[in-house]
Every structure is written in C-alpha cells, then in structure tokens.
Image (tube, grey):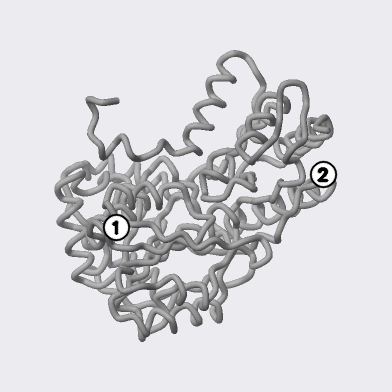
Amino acid sequence: MEKLSNRVNQISESQTIAMARKSRELKAQGIDIISLSLGEPDFATPDIIKDAAKKAIDENFSYYTHVSGYLELREAICKKFKRDNGLTYTPDEIVVSTGAKQSIANAVLCLVNPGDEVIIPAPFWVSYLEILKLAEGKPVIVNTGIESDFKITAPQLEKAITSKTKLIMLSTPCNPTGSVYNKAELKALADVIAKHKDVYVLSDEIYEHINFVGGHESFAQFDFIKDRVITINGVSKGFAMTGWRGGILAGPKWIAQACDKMQGQFTSATSSITQKAMHKAMELDYDTYIKPMRDAFLKRRDLVLKGMNEIPGLKTNLPQGAFYVYPEISYYFGKKYKDYVIKNGTDLTMFLLDEAHVALVPGAAFGEDNYIRFSYATSEKNLTEALKRMKEALAKLQ
C-alpha cells in the first residue's frame, strides 16, 4: 500500500496468526478444521491465579503502576530467577511487559541501530526477523538442521560474528523445533561470545517449564557474560496464560532502564490485573501446578512422534521441550494429487489444510521451507484424528 509507511510495508504478517485466521474462516463455513497452528496451551489458567486476579479487581487494583511493573511483582520475579535458575537480579533489572513479544521488541529496539548485524539461528520464531526489520538491523541467518537437533554450534557462531555484530537471538526450549540447549552447549556459545566484547545475547526462555530433560539451563548462568545477556520469559506457555499478556525481561540495569523508557512511550505498564496474576504465578509450586501440564505435553509428544513414524517420508528429531514437532518433509517434493504439486513446505501445508482439514505452519515462517510445524498443544483426541487425516491425505500424493 503506497499510502502506508515503508516500515509497515516491509514487515510480514505472522504466518502462525495468518494460518489461525484461515482456520477460523473455514470453521465459520462449517468445515471441521483441526488447528495445530498456534503455540497456545489448551489448559485453563490455574484457579489460584484467576482468584488472585479476581481479588485484585475487587480491591480496585486498577490504577497505573510503575511502567516496569509494581515493585513487589518485580521482587517476586527476582525470587523466581534465584529459586529456579540460580540467577541474581534486582528489581531495577526487571521489566514486565505486555507479553514476551513486547519484551523482545523492547530489547531489540533499544540495542540495535540501523545496519547492526544480528545473528539468528534458523529455524527461528517468526517474530524475531520482523522485529529486527523494524529496528533496521541486518539479519545474519545461521542455518541449522535436523542432524544437529536444530542447534547452532560454537564454530558456526564464531564464523558468523563480524565487527558489525551487535546481538544473537535464540530460544531454548526452541520454537518451532522443541530443541533444548544443555549446559555444555550453552557454555560453548558463551565462550565464543566472551571473546567479542560488543556482542549481546537475547535468550528467549518462554518455554522454560515445558522441558522434558530435567532442569532448564539459562544463558545468563555464566557470570563472565551475564552483563551482556538479556533473558526473556513470561507466563503464557508454562502457566497457560496466553491471553493475559504478561512478559518478563531481565538484564543489566542500563538495558532495563532503556526498555522502561521505550515501553513508557508505547504502552506504559501492562494491565495491573495481569500483574497481580503474574505475581501469584511466580510463587506457585512447580510440582503441584505446572508439572501436570508438562507431563501431559510429554505424553502428547510421544503420541505425535509415534503417529508420524507411521507416515512415510516424515523425518523427525526428538524434541526435548516446548510443544512442537518440526518434521522434514522433502520426501513429498515433486509429488502430485489432482491440481496440487508439492514443491515446498508451504505447498504441503495448504494441501493438508484443503485435503485433511488440518492447519499447520510451513517452515518458511521460521526460515526454512523444507519443514512444517506441528503444534501438539491440544487434546490427544484431536492429535490422533489429525495424524489419521494427515496419513490418509499424504498417501494420495504420488
């Protein structure tokens, strides 16, 4: 649109959101669509969190708070980081935002100048690249693959760093692959970063609690680079609070202050009621409130992997966190059915939407179109039916 700014014209719509919208449109037409496109837990927010929010409403906690979140909440977040991650932060190093997406945008817009290079391992979460475009940074995409469990290695990182590198952005557990970096892998990356004093890390750890390999490893645990690590977290995934919009940024005080300044001109503080709900979430016992959801996701993962192993041509790794499977699907390239010719993951997702009525997201959204993302954040019944439909539809391709 020539009347719109170049800024908005150059960014793309989120393909996960676009596929979810397409699913809703088809459902409105009476078509039975199983939507596996959004990364949204199907669990209800725990009652204890909802009760805290209701209490806040009844007590008229409905006024502006500090832009970065009210002090007691930030203190509770500091306690959470110490308890769960062994990380020491002070309240002035914490910024609460309207979702982890805003936390990421704050950090990128505060750090990246036009022309600065930002290293992004692919596959990557859809919004990293688009947020970087708004900051006019230059993406340096480092491709990983299923063979390396979709993780960037220290030699790859070293090779990608130049005198213009400002930031590396990555997630663990990872969206879209479910890969989880262990301590040794993070330490190897940290050792590289330590040699480059002007390079910062944005570590997106929003899926921390959906981890199937034991304790979560935070990038900021390495004291020798902690002052250059920005940790992103929030309540959407681990606490089933997507609609509440509560994000967390933890980092050096000067970065937190800059993000507070930035946020003060965009949204100011996130909802005061959401903040009270987040406060309660920070205090919850993991085994009682979070582990049951995590265990359900693990059971679903195994169900999905078993189903995919029964479908010819789907090559999978073993996702160790989050709630996604990211199969490689090049086996189907060149195959046809009726008017469909499959050339890439985008073609295959449209074929599956039309023929199987299953909504997935093409790998192109995450930087590589030889894959598709399958979210198992839904019931076992839906997953079983979706896999059955996929198997039947894919068998038609010859």
Residue 375, compared with residue 257, is above or below; it is above
163 or 275: which is nearer to us? Answer: 163
Left or right, 175 with respect to 204, comes to right
Q: Which residue is mark 1?
A: 108
Please give the label number shown on residue 311.
2
SS at mark 2 in the image: loop
Please give the label number shown on residue 358.
none
The kind of residue on which mark 1 rests is Val
- Quarter-of-image position of residue 57: top left
The kind of residue on which mark 2 rests is Ile
339 or 308: which is nearer to us? Answer: 339
Q: Is residue 289 visible?
A: no
Looking at the rendering, in which quadrant would you find the C terminus? top right
375 or 212: which is nearer to us? Answer: 375
The reply to whether the C-beta atoms of the residues labelled 1 and 2 are less than 8 Å apart is no
Q: Position of residue 99 (x, y in %)?
A: 35, 49
Residue for point 47% across, 77% down: 189
Left or right, 235 with respect to 291, comes to left
Residue 218, compared with residue 299, is above or below; it is below
